[in-house]
Image (cartoon, grey):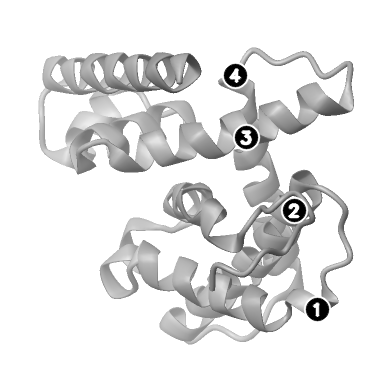
């Protein structure tokens, strides 16, 4: 699956962490109990690989959007299959929009001004690195960060969800963000 899809050498595999983070943000806890995040991402990457000749984009931003559409379709189908609901095209479109919003939020973590194409490409690379760094966090830290920064949950709500005190959640968030900052600084030095 590591065949190049872009002239600059970008491969589908480079988007795995990014897609895992987006799927984790959008998948309900109930669905995650039935279907793993990595399963839905693997399915997305396999479908993209099979359809790579149909991709007509020219940059990594377009590739990310194409992959988000495939992921949204897969998440919609999985939700429907596990809830036995009939297909709802509006739900598929709203999930696509939610994934795009999640991607925008991920980009907002990076203080990026995009005056030039090279800076835009660099920002896309930073988003992929941030997603990979978030995926490396211990599960509880990752979950706390996703719930607070993407879903806007309070410390009390996260604590109830993870069966921990708000103070423990604050510690998870602090350690997770500290780890992310250190990893991103290390990557920037490399």
Q: Is residue 87 above or below residue 111?
A: below
For mark 1, give the secondary structure: helix
Q: Which residue is mark 4?
A: 110
Q: Which residue is mark 2?
A: 65
State yes or no: discs 3 and 1 in contact (Cβ < 8 Å): no
Q: Is residue 79 above or below residue 137?
A: below
Per the model, the C-alpha gap separating discs 3 and 2 is 14 Å
Residue 33 coordinates in the image, percent (x, y): 26, 67
Label 4 Cα neighbours within 10 Å, binned few <14 / some 14-19 / many ≥20: few
Per the model, the C-alpha gap separating discs 3 and 1 is 23 Å
Question: Between residues 122 and 98, which one lies in front from this camera angle?
Answer: 122
Residue 177 coordinates in the image, percent (x, y): 33, 18
Sequence-first disc among 1 and 2: 1
Residue 104 showing in the rendered view: yes
Closer to us: mark 4 or mark 1?
Answer: 1
Q: Which residue is mark 3?
A: 125
Per the model, the C-alpha gap separating discs 3 and 4 is 11 Å
């Amino acid at each position: 699956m590591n065949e190049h899809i872009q002239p600059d050498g970008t491969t589908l595999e480079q988007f795995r962490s990014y897609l895992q983070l987006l799927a984790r943000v959008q998948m309900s806890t109930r669905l995650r109990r039935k279907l793993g995040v990595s399963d839905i991402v693997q399915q997305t990457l396999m479908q993209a690989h099979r359809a790579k000749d149909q991709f007509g984009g020219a940059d990594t931003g377009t590739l990310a959007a194409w992959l988000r559409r495939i992921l949204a379709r897969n998440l919609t189908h999985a939700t429907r299959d596990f809830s036995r609901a009939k297909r709802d095209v509006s739900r598929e479109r709203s999930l696509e929009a939610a994934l795009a919003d999640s991607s925008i939020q991920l980009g907002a973590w990076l203080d990026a001004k995009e005056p030039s194409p090279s800076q835009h490409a660099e920002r896309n690379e930073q988003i992929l690195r941030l997603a990979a760094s978030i995926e490396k966090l211990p599960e509880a830290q990752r979950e706390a960060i996703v719930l607070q920064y993407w879903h806007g949950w309070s410390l009390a709500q996260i604590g109830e969800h993870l069966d921990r005190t708000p103070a423990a959640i604050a510690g998870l968030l602090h350690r997770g963000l500290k780890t992310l900052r250190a990893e991103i600084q290390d990557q920037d030095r490399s």
